[in-house]
Image (cartoon, helix red, strand yellow):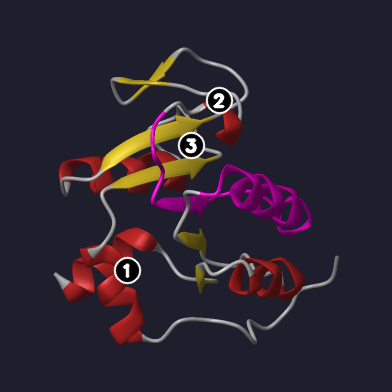
Amino acid sequence: MECEFATINSNKDEIKSIFQNTKTIAVIGCSPDPSKASNKVAKYLKNAGFTIFPVYPKEDEILGEKVYRHLSDIPFKVDMVDIFRKPEVIDKIVDESIKRGDINTIWTQLGLVNNDAANKALKAGMNVVQNNCTKIEHEALF
C-alpha cells in the first residue's frame, strides 16, 4: 500500500468529544518495550484515567494490564481502538471492530492512514481519527 493522505478525519471539536466520551481503549500493537511509542502512549492514556487493553501477539502483561492476542478476545466494552499497526492491516482491525459492535472510535496513530478502512468505519457509525497521536491530542486538549 502506498502512503495516503487522510481524506477522512475528525476535527478538533470532534476529537475533544471523543475523549470526553471514552473510558476504555484497546491499544492494538502495544509493545512491552518502554522505549516504543505504543508503550509510551498507552502508559500516558492509563495515567490520564483511561482503562487500557493492550493487544499484542506475545507477553502476558504490559503496563500492569492483561494482554489480549486479538481485539475479539477482550471480554469488556471497548470505546476506542487505538491502532499502532501498518496501514495494510487496518482494514482487518476495522472489520473486527465492526463485528464486535461496541466500538465508538477507530483511531490510527501518526503516519497511519487507510481511507478505505476509515470509510468502512464511518459507514458503521464510528468516529474516525487518522494520522494523529492520542497522547499529543489529549495533552493539547486537556
Percent x, y for residue 11? Answer: 40, 86
Q: Are marks 1 and 2 in contact (CB under 8 Å)?
A: no
For the point 16% across and 45% down, which residue is it? 49
Residue 30 badge:
3
For the point 46% across and 62% down, which residue is it? 105
Distance between mark 1 and mark 2 Cα atoms = 24 Å
**Secondary structure type for disc 2:** helix
Callout 2 environment at 10 Å: few (<14), some (14 to 19), or many (20+)? few
Q: Are marks 1 and 3 in contact (CB under 8 Å)?
A: no
Identified by mark 2, the residue type is Asp
**Secondary structure type for disc 1:** helix
From this view, report whether residue 37 is shown above or below residue 69.
Answer: below
User: Which of pointers 2 and 3 indicates the residue nearer the eye?
Assistant: 2
Say whether disc 1 or disc 2 marks the residue closer to the N-terminus: 1
For the point 52% across and 61% down, which residue is it? 106
Q: Can you tell which quarter of the image residue 38 is in? A: top left
Q: Quadrant of the N terminus?
A: bottom right
Percent x, y for residue 93? Answer: 66, 48
Say whether disc 2 or disc 3 marks the residue closer to the N-terminus: 3
Identified by mark 1, the residue type is Ile
Q: Which residues are magenta?
A: 76-101
Callout 3 environment at 10 Å: few (<14), some (14 to 19), or many (20+)? many
Say whether disc 1 or disc 3 marks the residue closer to the N-terminus: 1
Left or right: 64 as drawn, with respect to 76: left
Residue at image mark 1: 18
**Secondary structure type for disc 3:** loop
Identified by mark 3, the residue type is Cys
